Image (cartoon, rainbow, N blue to C red):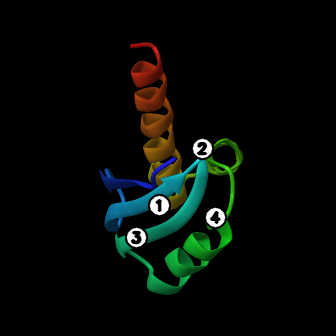
Amino acid sequence: MAVEKIVYETKGTCSSQIILEIEDDVIKSCVFIGGCNGNLKGISSLVKGQNVSAVLDRLDGITCGSKTTSCPDQLAQCLKQYISKKASVAAI
């Protein structure tokens, strides 16, 4: 299967975008644009090589301070969108 590149515009966080490459439901690369550089490099490193569903389960719903979302949660939202799109394409 080919590598799928996803560019996701974040909402409610210091980062502005997440750029993912996914192949066979495994995250090949993850780059955050903006935000807390060191923390986001750490998250990117931790999710690389991980299954999409496992990452989604771990990160969904994490908040940042008084915000209702966070950069990890926005990554989870991006992965939800990826799974939904994949399911709709498979249904065709």
Query: Which tag is nearer the camera, tag 2 or tag 4?
Result: 4
Task: Kindly state the secondary structure of the residue where label 3 is placed.
Answer: strand
* Image height of 85 relative to 25, above or below: above
Question: Which amino acid type is shown beneath numbered disc 3?
Answer: Phe
The residue indicated by pointer 3 is 32
Q: Nearer the viewer, residue 89 or 20?
A: 89
| Circle 3 residues within 10 Å: few <14, some 14–19, many ≥20 | many
> Amino acid type of disc 4?
Val
Which amino acid lies under the numbered mark 1 shown in the image of this protein? Cys
What residue does disc 4 label? 47
- Where residue 46 appears, as percent x and y from the top left, is 67, 70
For disc 2, the marked residue is: 60
User: Which comes before the other along the chain, label 2 or label 1?
Assistant: 2
Q: Circle 1 is placed at which residue position?
A: 71
On the image, the x and y values in percent for residue 59 come to: 63, 51
Alpha carbon separation for disc pair 2 and 1: 10 Å
Question: Are there few (<14), some (14-19), or many (20+) residues within 10 Å of tag 2?
Answer: some
Residue at left offset 46%, top offset 30%:
86
Do the numbered discs 3 and 4 sit on residues whose CB atoms are within 8 Å? no
* Vertical arrangement, residue 37 with respect to residue 44, above or below: below
